[in-house]
Image: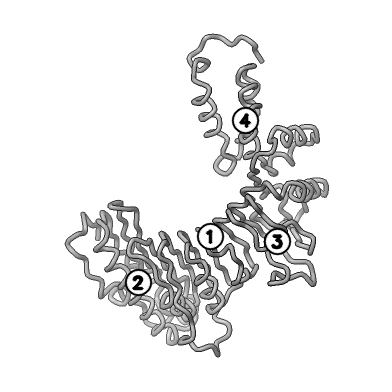
Amino acid sequence: MSDDPVSAPIYTINDDVLLYIITFNADMFSDDNALHTTRIASQVCRHWRDLMLESPSLWAKLIDMDRICKVRADKWREELVRRSGAAPLWIKANSSLTATFWARPAKHNVQFFYDFINGNWHRIQKLICARYFGFHLTRSSSMFLPAPLLEHCEASFELQSGVEISNTTPLFANHAPMLRSISFPCQHLNRKAPWLGHLHSMVFDRTYNVPDALAILVAAHSLQELKIDNISNRRRNVATSTFPIASLPHLKSLEYNTHNVSAATSIVEHVEIPANCSLSIRILRFDDSNQAEPHFRSISNRFTRHAEYALKANIFDKIVFNYQRKSRISFVCRATRPAQCALSISIPPFGAGSDLCCRPSTPSMVWGNIRLPSVCGNHTH
């Protein structure tokens, strides 16, 4: 490391601009080598090193367990934590802590992760540990403590026997004022959680049934992004007439992937979304085409109604119909003005995956009633 670097243009850049460039390149969620790159940059010259060491937020957003655990040097782990100061933390823990068929993660790595989470929970802003590695929650887990800075949490975990998420043991002790995005695969959220009202993004999976999902959506009225992956249709004895209407006036994107068309029908008929909301419905397969057809017609009609509103509110510059008789039928259109908006619906032929002798779907069943108003731009058919 040089104390007096050569007079190259890079060394004349304003400190604010230089730090912006370094920070831009220090995104561990888009670049797996971000921590290594930043560490090397801090060794270029004395000026760069001093500038970077005086920026704890830079290092606090580089707690990449996947990289840290590959370095068998406790001193570097401790140094990284020291450099982060008291700044809000971003933590990523995926591959290095993932249990596989052949091996489990090293115990000292898992212990370091637990200790770090428990010791710094109060300043964690973003936590991504999306792959299961035996992350068990106990009654004393940090997940049940207040999370004053937490904004984004995506975690795969299991509850220890006898522990459940409930009114008596609520996630984040019901205190997560900054929380905007959450994804807990295979775990059921409490519909009475006070932080549901300020969420911007969430994911539902097969853990949820229709009534529970709608109850949560009623509370999560500020959502901007919603993804639903094949929720179940349990509690069939519940009449759909008792389901609440979930109004999501701020929603910008709704993505629904399912093979349970009955559950999908109940959801789309009870969720209100704005005209400029992107909508994607992908039906993976039909298990029983005879029972699926009336439900699919309801889904198609709901999609058609939303498409007509969206086509009037936006200028679409691309519309594609794709009819593959033996595999899939799809309709996609995209707009860039006055705002980004995309519409898509994709289905297999009736009977795909079960009774292949059943008659196939036809394009008219998907978009036969969609009218393309004059506000549309150039289209591809």
Residue at which label 3 appears: 157
Alpha-carbon distance for marks 2 and 3? 35 Å
Verify CB contact (< 8 Å) between mark 4 and mark 2.
no
Residue 303, labelled with which disc?
2
Disc 2 from disc 1: Cα separation:
25 Å
Tag 2 secondary structure: helix
Above or below residue 357? Residue 57 is: above
Image quadrant occupied by the C terminus: bottom left
Mark 1 neighbour class, 10 Å CA radius: few under 14, some 14 to 19, many 20 or more: many
Measure how far apart labels 3 and 4 are at the Cα level.
33 Å
Q: Which label sits in the foreground, 4 or 2?
A: 4
Q: Which tag, 4 or 1, sits closer to the chain's start? A: 4
Which residue lies at the image location 82% right of the left edge and 49% below the top edge? Answer: 107
Looking at the image, which residue sits at the far left? 374
The x and y percentages for residue 104 are 78, 53
Looking at this view, is 328 or 317 the one in front?
A: 317
Of residue 87 and residue 381, the one placed in the foreground of this image is 87
